[in-house]
């Protein structure tokens, strides 16, 4: 049996967010069991329907497709030996441990990249914005902690 993956707008009452927007989730189905994974993005029904065609939404479409392709690749690799715990581990896999970094800019960038990989898109965007503002106030390429 093969696992299937798709994007869906999770329109259930308690998940409804302000102004008729709902969280976009990755739905993975294997042996009739369904699990939903939050991707850190919320859209209205009309935005979700025209996600691939509307110019203002193309960046979000690329982000969502990144996660969908990643999930499909993992599911294809696991194929017959599919296990939920293994899928989740591979989907949310952290980067290898790196040596301690003493540069503020690099820490911001690495943390933002980690959030993007985890599907926390809005947090990723916030950290990138903060990083850009910090770089605007500090003329050097590096900003050391001490």
Image (spheres, rainbow, N blue to C red):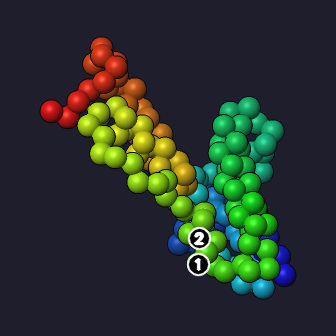
Q: Which residue is mark 2?
A: 88
Residue 23 location, quadrant: bottom right
Q: Secondary structure at mark 1?
A: helix
User: Where is 74 relative to 140, above or below?
Assistant: below
Quadrant showing the N terminus: bottom right
Q: Nearer the viewer, residue 38 or 68?
A: 68
Q: Nearer the viewer, residue 142 or 49?
A: 142
User: Where is 12 relative to 57, above or below?
Assistant: below
Q: Nearer the viewer, residue 101 or 20?
A: 101
Q: Residue at x 71, y 44 (%)?
A: 61
Q: Is residue 110 visible?
A: yes
Pinpoint residue 141: horizontal percent, then vertical percent.
34, 20
Q: Is residue 22 left or right of residue 106?
A: right
Q: Which residue is mark 1?
A: 85
- For the residues labelled 2 and 1, say whether their Cβ atoms are less than 8 Å apart: yes
Pinpoint residue 77: horizontal percent, then vertical percent.
76, 67
Pinpoint residue 59: horizontal percent, then vertical percent.
66, 37
């Amino acid at each position: 049996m093969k696992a299937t993956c798709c994007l869906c707008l999770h329109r259930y009452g308690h998940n409804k967010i302000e102004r008729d927007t709902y969280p976009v989730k990755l739905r993975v189905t294997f042996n009739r069991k369904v699990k939903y994974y939050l991707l850190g993005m919320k859209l209205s029904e009309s935005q979700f329907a025209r996600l691939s065609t509307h110019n203002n939404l193309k960046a979000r479409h690329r982000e969502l497709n990144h996660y969908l392709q990643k999930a499909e690749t993992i599911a294809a690799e696991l194929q017959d030996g599919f296990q939920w715990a293994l899928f989740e581990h591979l989907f949310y896999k952290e980067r290898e441990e790196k040596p301690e970094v003493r540069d503020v800019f690099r820490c911001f960038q690495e943390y933002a990249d980690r959030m993007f990989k985890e599907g926390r898109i809005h947090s990723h965007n916030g950290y990138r914005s903060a990083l850009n503002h910090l770089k605007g106030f500090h003329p050097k390429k590096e900003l050391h902690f001490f």
